[in-house]
Amino acid sequence: MCMVIFAPVLATFAFATCGGYSGHLRVKVDCADKSQANITISFGYPFRFEQVHFKVPLCEVKRHETLFLEGDFSTPAQFFVTVAVFAFLYSLLATVIYIFYQKEYREKNRGPLLDFLVTVIFASMWLLSSCAWAKALSGVKETMDSAQILFLMAACRDPVNDCEALEKPVWTRLHTSVIFGFLNVSLWAGNVWFAYKETGLHKTSQRANRTLSEKQSSFSQRQYSQQSSFDQSGATLGQQLYRQVSFDHSGGGISLPHASLGQASSLFNTSSRGPLILINDM
């Protein structure tokens, strides 16, 4: 239920804060000849800075120079936004299926298995895209650093001219996009376990382990029962033999009845091969 409620919301905030971002840097150039110029450098998603250019006055002569920024951070930014958009769409589709097509979803366990695989994929994609975008954001901030921009301008490298940044970019939205990215990582990674439980695979594994344990226990009990029965039979037969043995007072011999002999031979026919000495009454 948490997945159905929060996944579309977090995905929406993730791609909206990153994909809809635009910022600018405003710089003032005061030349030594009292001329002044305000320069605005605008940029935004997908952060292809090699396409961003601006004109800067050359204070020595009445000319301008055109400068281009360096850096292309479009790949991690677009990857992050793409994952967010597809996660949003899949969350909506999964919500519709959970509510209106529950019977078809449960049929032959195909729906839970597919949902589990997709959840694992999205959890991995969110982790990769969030890490890539967090690293790219540090590059974006370094490229648009006011000191770096002022150093690119020839007029600002001359100490007789005065240059300063009037307005710097606000990075709050982009920082928020990174936070929402890792929140999505936590949400989808946590949902992997619940999606796995829906497949019933853990129950099958537990059932197989339980069956194997029961078989081993039954086999051990059967062996113990057979051994106990054998020991009891041997003890009973020994007692019978002891009772039936008679001592001949006149000849000093031992009389072993034939019935006892048959029982003894049937009991020990597989284990005892030694000679059997019988002493009959004279």
Image (cartoon, rainbow, N blue to C red):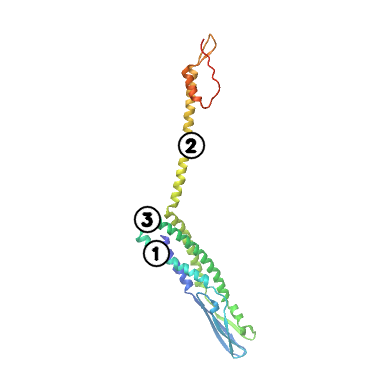
**Can residue 243 be seen here?**
yes
State which mark lies toward you, 3 or 2: 3
Among the two numbered marks 1 and 3 on one chain, the one whose residue lies closer to the N terminus? 1
Residue at x 43% of width, y 61% of height: 3
Secondary structure of the residue carrying tag 1 is helix
Q: Secondary structure at mark 3?
A: helix
State the image quarter where residue 97 is shown. bottom left
Left or right side of 88 for 132: right
Label 2: few (<14), some (14–19) or many (≥20) C-alpha neighbours in 10 Å: few
| Dot placed on the residue nearer the N-terminal end, 2 or 1 | 1
Alpha carbon separation for disc pair 3 and 2: 40 Å
Q: Is residue 70 left or right of residue 94?
A: right
Q: Residue at x 55, y 69 (%)?
A: 135
Q: Amino acid at mark 1?
A: Leu
Task: Give residue 47's position: percent from left, percent from top.
Answer: 52, 75
Q: In which quarter of the view is residue 210 placed?
A: top left
The percent coordinates of residue 156 (x first, y second) are 61, 83
Q: Which residue is mark 3?
A: 107
Question: Residue 14, image x and y in percent?
Answer: 47, 69
Where is residue 229? Give x, y as percent. 46, 29
Q: What is the number of callouts on the image?
A: 3
Q: Could you tell me the amino acid type at mark 2?
A: Ser
The residue singled out by tag 2 in the image is 220
Residue 157 lies, with reference to residue 91, above or below; the image says: below
In this rendering, is residue 84 above or below 104? below
Residue 93: numbered disc: 1
**Upstream in the sequence, badge 3 or badge 2?**
3
Contact (Cβ within 8 Å) of mark 2 with mark 1: no
Q: Amino acid at mark 3?
A: Glu
